[in-house]
Amino acid sequence: GDSVTQMEGPVTLSEEAFLTINCTYTATGYPSLFWYVQYPGEGLQLLLKATKADDKGSNKGFEATYRKETTSFHLEKGSVQVSDSAVYFCALSSNTGNQFYFGTGTSLTVIP
Amino acid sequence: DTAVSQTPKYLVTQMGNDKSIKCEQNLGHDTMYWYKQDSKKFLKIMFSYNNKELIINETVPNRFSPKSPDKAHLNLHINSLELGDSAVYFCASSLLGSGGRNEQFFGPGTRLTVL
């Protein structure tokens, strides 16, 4: 069945460092892909999404490109800030839309 | 103008009690979900309702019973609470009718602590 695998954390970076959080997926057909962010004590918020191959989602300096050939949707940011400290979830919506799969989450801590 | 709201935000109760968590969305979505998030932040889908009909019912104890009085509400009732039920419970909603390309919107969560 469909699934999402993301890199395990926790990840600790210094401010202004480059961030990559890897996410790969297994799916039939053409799923939609998402990154969600969960700040401490809050619910999940959509960070960015891509609905077809080669689409690039971007928001708040974060980017991810839907790569069908490598079944990946890696999250990147060129220069992280302390305020980016959160848990990041990769997610997939199945071809039919009636199944939604989350990765295990990656905790990011950015230190000044 | 809250999109997905849950009440209560915190719930502390004794083992063996029965409690309910309420969820409401004002986004006009047709599908609602309940998730359980454990202390390691792992998210587990519990239930999903589409137009008031149950479409996802994962392996959860039958002490958990969802109820959807209408498309905008999905409540979760838990009987005979156990220590292992302590977690954060999230409600979410989405619009499946758009072809599955839309994301889920999450509520702020309900932190349940069973003593």
Image: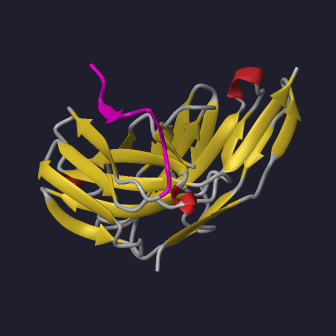
All told, the count of numbered labels is 0
Q: Against B9, is A99 above or below?
A: below
- From the viewer's perspective, is A8 left or right of B92? right
Query: B47 or B87: nearer the eye?
Result: B87
Residue under the point 29% across and 65% down: A98
- From the viewer's perspective, is A81 left or right of A48? right
**In the image, which residues are magenta?**
B1-15
Q: Against A78, is A94 above or below?
A: below
Residue B2 lies in the magenta stretch: yes
Query: A8 or B78: nearer the eye?
Result: B78
Residue A88, image x, y percentages? 63, 44
Residue A1 lies in the magenta stretch: no
Asked which colour scheme the image uses, the reply is: secondary structure
Query: A93 or B79: nearer the eye?
Result: B79
Query: A70 or A74: nearer the eye?
Result: A74
Residue lying farthest to the bottom in this orientation: A1
Residue A26, image x, y percentages? 54, 73
- Asked if residue A102 can be seen in this view, the reply is no
Residue under the point 28% across and 47% down: B94
Q: Against A33, is A78 above or below?
A: above
Residue under the point 59% across and 59% down: A103
- From the viewer's perspective, is B12 left or right of B60? right
Residue under the point 79% across and 34% down: A109
- Asked if residue A76 can be seen in this view, the reply is yes
Residue B12, image x, y percentages? 50, 40
Quadrant placement of the N terminus of chain B: top left
Residue A13, image x, y percentages? 86, 35
